[in-house]
Amino acid sequence: MQRMGNVIGLQPDAIAEYKRLHADVWPGVLAKIADCNIRNYSIYLKEPENLLFAYFEYHGTDFAADSAKMAADPTTQEWWSVCMPLQKPLDTRREGEWWAGMEEVFHVD
């Protein structure tokens, strides 16, 4: 299992809509997340900076392949088309990233 953290900005005028969407995530999106070996997925919001922090655990063996499978899913693509305009990617993210990956610097069970 691999723990993963990501961060992205949220448009200030999109907070209520983002919370509304995530209070009732589409069942097909949730099913695809599970199908792609992602478990224990959480998103946190830090205001007033309007930063979203996502944490999840990857239980598969090929994250790139599972990420591609998720990206190819029509329901996930539609979900992203609704959510992505609300987000504000960090200028410092790596090439090809939407959510910026983070380095784990500490963990304890």
Image (cartoon, helix red, strand yellow):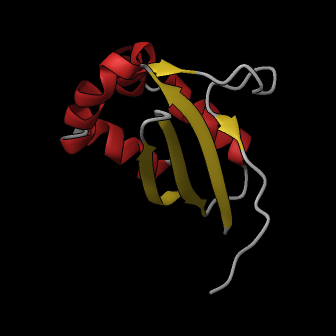
x and y, in percent, of residue 53 in the image: 53, 46
x and y, in percent, of residue 4 in the image: 65, 55
Q: Quadrant of the C terminus?
A: bottom right
In the picture shown, does residue 44 fall above or below 28?
below
Pick the front one: 106 or 70: 106
Farthest bottom residue in view = 109
Q: In this view, does 65 lie to the left or right of 78?
A: right
Residue shown at 52% from the left, 48% from the top: 54
x and y, in percent, of residue 79 in the image: 35, 24
Q: How many marks?
A: 0
Residue shown at 52% from the left, 34% from the top: 70
In the picture shown, does residue 3 fall above or below 89?
below
x and y, in percent, of residue 38 in the image: 52, 55
Q: In which quarter of the image is the N terminus?
A: bottom right
In the picture shown, does residue 101 fall above or below 60?
above
Q: In this view, does 10 lie to the left or right of 62?
A: left
Q: Quadrant of residue 94?
A: top right
Q: Is residue 25 left or right of residue 5?
A: left
Residue shown at 32% from the left, 17% from the top: 13
Farthest front residue in view = 48
Residue shown at 75% from the left, 72% from the top: 106
